[in-house]
Image: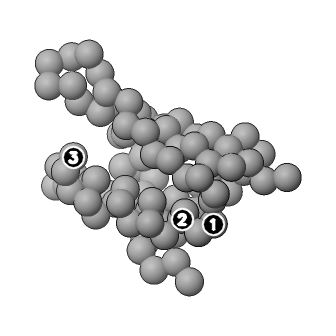
Amino acid sequence: SIKNIYAKECYRRLKQFKSTGYWRVSIERFREILDVPESYRTCHVNDKVLKPIQKELSLYFGNLNIVKVKSEDAGNPITHLEFFFDKEK
């Protein structure tokens, strides 16, 4: 019942971390895993990838929270994404 292609792949990845309820991934690796086009700027990734993931997967992963970890470098680019959700028992 998951419609968004990025949400489907992210679901598979989050299921691998169901016992910890936490997944940290570099933004480069995240783009590679989900096959996000290189042409997508950060704002596109937020609108077309992260928001649909948050919306669709909140039904499957309780308290799903996506945190963007930013660098101290000029422009504060996002370096990692952290996914927090309720552990499965």
Q: Is residue 12 visible?
A: no
Q: Is residue 56 found left or right of 13 in the rendered image?
A: left
Q: Is residue 39 found left or right of 32 in the rendered image?
A: left
Q: Quadrant of residue 5?
A: bottom left
Mark 3 highlights which residue? 42
Mark 1 highlights which residue? 60
Q: Residue at x 68, y 49 (%)?
A: 86
Q: Name the one closer to the observer, 63 or 61.
A: 63
Marks 3, 1: nearer the viewer: 1
Q: Residue at x 85, y 52 (%)?
A: 89
Mark 2 highlights which residue? 57
| Residue that protrudes farthest toward the bottom in the picture | 1
Q: Is residue 71 above or below residue 89?
A: above
Q: Which badge, 3 or 1, comes first in the chain's sequence? A: 3
Residue 46 in the image: state x and y as whole percent: 28, 53
- Which amino acid, mark 3? Thr
Q: Quadrant of residue 59?
A: bottom right
Q: Which badge, 3 or 2, comes first in the chain's sequence? A: 3
Q: Is residue 8 above or below residue 30?
A: below
Q: CA distance from mark 2 to mark 1?
A: 5 Å
Residue 62 in the image: state x and y as whole percent: 64, 57
- Which amino acid, mark 2? Leu
User: Colour scheme in the image?
Assistant: one colour
Question: Disc 2 vs disc 1: Cβ atoms closer than 8 Å?
Answer: yes
Q: Quadrant of residue 55?
A: bottom left
Label 1: state its secondary structure: loop
